[in-house]
Image (cartoon, rainbow, N blue to C red):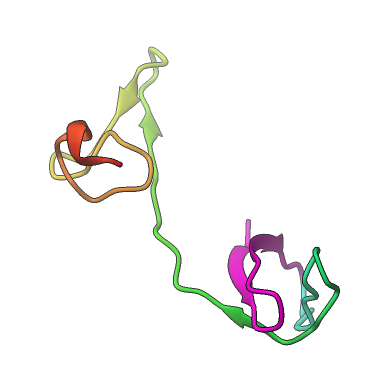
Amino acid sequence: MPIFEYRCQECGKQFEELVLGGRTEVACPKCSASNVKKLVSVVSFRSTRSDGSASYPSNASKCAGCSSTACSTCH
């Protein structure tokens, strides 16, 4: 699903928006301004084995939102 992160250039609110089709206009949910900037997002994924357990790439973090292999550094 095409979910993008944005930051409002008027009020500074950072938010996510599901953008479907050719829609290009996005408005801030806080102040309704259309002066928003698309941010570069961190991508995370997880595969699921047939037994339901998680399968992570060998060099990937099991933490959501960091690139470290040690979860103690995710803060």
Quarter of the image that includes the C terminus:
top left
**Outermost residue, bottom side:** 35
Residue 63, compared with residue 2, is above or below; it is above
Task: Write the start and end of the magenta stretch as one range.
Answer: 1-20
Is residue 56 or residue 66 the one in the foreground?
66
Residue 44, compared with residue 23, is above or below; it is above
Image location of residue 14, percent across then percent down: 61, 65
**Outermost residue, top side:** 51
Horizontal side of 13 relative to 25 (left or right) equals: left
**Outermost residue, front side:** 11
Is residue 68 or residue 43 the one in the foreground?
68
Image location of residue 71, percent across then percent down: 22, 33
Quarter of the image that includes the N terminus:
bottom right
Horizontal side of 49 relative to 40 (left or right) equals: left
Residue at 38%, 12% in the rendered image: 51
Q: Residue 62 lies in magenta, yes or no? A: no
Horizontal side of 60 relative to 6 (left or right) equals: left
Residue 72 found in image quarter: top left
Image location of residue 31, percent across then percent down: 83, 71
Residue 72, compared with residue 22, is above or below; it is above
